[in-house]
Image: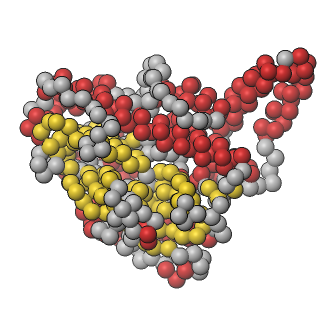
Amino acid sequence: MSLEMFGFKEIDHDRLKKTKTPYKIYAELLDDITQEQFYDVLSQDFVTYGALMPDAHAGYSMPIGGVCATKDVVVPQFVGFDIGCGMCAYRSDYTKSDITKHAKKIYEKIIDRIPLGFKKHKNHQSLKYDLPLSSFAKQVLNTLGLMQLGTLGGGNHFIEIGYDSLERVWIIIHSGSRGFGHKIASHYMYQAYLANSNKSDKLDKILKDFETRNQNFKIHNPNGYEKSFLKFKNRQLIELNKKINLDNLDGIWGVKVGSQLADEYIKDQNFALFFALENRKKMIEVICDILNQEIGGDFEFEHEDSDRFINRNHNHVEYDSEKNLWIHRKGATHAKAGMSGVIPGNMKDGSFIVIGKGNDKSLDSSSHGAGRVMSRKKAKEVLNMQDFEKSMKGIVGSVNEHTLDESPLAYKNIFEVMELQKDLVEVLWHIKVLINIKDSTKMRY
């Protein structure tokens, strides 16, 4: 299938150049929405450079597969909702033949022990940390986050077990910061919007009313009042965030670096990056235990072994001290020179272990996958189970009507995508799929 069939067309460079912001595009064709979103990004006066990876497609505000540099401004929209979403790969001691003998049982046990989709653990999971986070983020962590730690999520998130050309088995996970990161992202997107508009914040009135009602408490027990006020404020923030419909808020809203809001966002974003990594690590621990049980080994997950373990997220903002700029990546893998990374393809074509080449034109970035050619809704309408099942022959995977929107046919050709970014990364290993697990529950649109 050609990309033109799905609305992808020639890139309108004449229009993009009118923004006067330098850029680089590694994709050959783009759909209209992606081009429009990239134009809007380049049009911001605080954006100094932009790039689109070969998997670029429409996202929220900035295209997925997009990277941009900003001067003295951070933009929560440019990171997106799933802060810290990324890839972990771990090379085990097992071989292809070890897995194929037990593949179905391994698949079933993983599904039984790791919550998928909207499911979460019944109890809080342990998490040791010494990173700072705001009181708002801490409340979200303690009410939701710790129950979602070690869970996969839905959509294109997956657990994959595959093998390289030496038949060594790799565990590969694509997941993020779950509902914890989503609430953090939504909160700061909305606060950035309020900070850039003339609209009064409803929260101010609610907090003023609380202060008025508790004047005596504040006078006679100031420490107790501050604790109660903070708890009340965070509870109100969570309730207000539930009512946010960010789709109705037009525009791009940056936050000035050095402001309290920017400081809080950066702090909580960094914690969400940590949370997402710990989320993936906990799943790898469970999978290693399952492999040992089924195969009869005593293999241990050693996440400090850099020769075996790779972690690379693709949704974040970070400060580049050499450029004195803030680099935002949304669905783009950090690919600094010598940096290990993982680029997934689709359910049948596996993943690629890569080394970054540090290309400045891509802001040291590469694609985060193959990239969709059709929306989930469109995929459900035009694809069929017969072709889906045929494409997945020989793989133990989550293949049913609820994962039809994740069919390999809903994505760009990953081998063509890798060819388009040969100046960005070097492929070390192509991991071919033995087991692929995705959430199989009905998607919500």
**Residue 52 versus residue 331 in the image, above or below:** below
Residue visible at 13% across and 51% down in the picture: 165
**Residue at the image point whose x is 33% and y is 59% from the top:** 338
Place of residue 22 in the rendered image (x, y in percent of width and height, measured from the top left): 53, 76
Q: Give the quarter of the image for residue 382.
A: bottom left
Residue at the image position 57 percent from the left and 25 percent from the top: 143
Look at the picture and state if 330 lies above or below 244.
below
x, y percentage for residue 21? Answer: 57, 75
Tell me, yes or no, if residue 321 can be seen here.
yes
Residue 107 image point, x, y percent: 22, 32
Please give the count of numbered marks on the rendered protein.
0
Q: Can you give x and y, in whole percent of width and height, for residue 57 in the image?
A: 44, 61
- Horizontal side, residue 245 vs residue 369: left or right: right
Q: Quadrant of residue 430?
A: bottom left
Q: Is residue 402 above or below residue 319?
A: above
Q: Is residue 386 visible?
A: no
Describe the colour scheme in one phrase: secondary structure
For the N terminus, the quadrant is: bottom left
Left or right: 233, with 323 as reference point: right
Out of 33 and 278, give the one closest to the viewer.
278
**Residue 153 as seen in the image, left or right of residue 90:** right
Between 108 and 335, the one lying in front of the other is 335
Kindly identify the residue that appears in the image at 25 percent across and 42 percent down. Answer: 308
Residue at the front extreme? Answer: 322
